[in-house]
Image (cartoon, grey):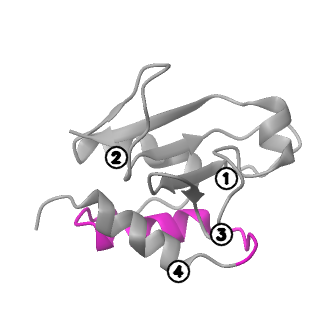
Amino acid sequence: MGWDPVRASNYARQHAMSSSHSLCATFVRHALHAGGVNITGIRLAKDYGPALESKGFVALGAGQNLIAGDIIVIQPYSGGNLAGHIAIYDGSAWFSDFRQNDMWAGPGYRARRPPHKIYRKR
């Protein structure tokens, strides 16, 4: 099976909880698998970039329109979760282990806007 971004993002939406349980990497990994991409051995959200690239994902440039299946990997910020964050876009909202208000996943990320990349499978 090839990459199915709609299936991946649907999985994320259907399995999202009502609030964060600090399980973003696990939930996004399961969504990726549901969409046909199997990534194993990565524990922290901040470390998913190279693994995504090894599976054919590329980092988007600034200002590109988002589509279902896009993945954001956010690096940690001082005073925040050392694991960073990862989420998948379903075409209208971002999901990790919960439905996010935006791609930043919370007030700390939103205020500090740490380094991040959005990846898309080519």
In this rendered view, identify the residue nearer to me: 78 or 27. 27
Q: Specify the segment rendered in magenta.
A: 18-39
* Type of amino acid at the residue the image marks with label 4: His
Q: Secondary structure at mark 4?
A: helix
Please state, as top left, top right, bottom left or bottom right, where the C terminus lies in the image: top left
Task: Give, as a three-letter code, the residue at label 1.
Answer: Ala
Distance CA(mark 3)–CA(mark 1): 16 Å
State the mark number for residue 15.
Answer: 4
The mark nearer the N terminus, 3 or 2, is 2
Answer with the quarter of the image where residue 1 lies: bottom left
Q: Which residue is mark 1?
A: 83
* Disc number for residue 98: 3
Question: Disc 2 vs disc 1: which is toward the camera?
Answer: 2
Q: Earlier in the sequence, mark 4 or mark 2?
A: 4
Q: Is residue 39 left or right of residue 109?
A: left
Q: Residue furthest left?
A: 1
Secondary structure found at label 2: helix
The crowding category of the residue bearing disc 2, from other C-alpha atoms within 10 Å (few below 14, some 14 to 19, many at least 20), is many
Residue 39: % across, % down: 33, 62
Between circles 3 and 2, the one closer to the viewer is 3
Instruction: Indicate the amino acid at tag 3.
Output: Phe
Q: Is residue 96 left or right of residue 66?
A: right
Measured in 3D between alpha carbons, the distance from the residue under mark 3 to the one under mark 2, in whole angstroms, is 21 Å
Q: Residues within 10 Å of mark 1 (few under 14, many from 20)?
A: some
Q: Quadrant of residue 53?
A: top left
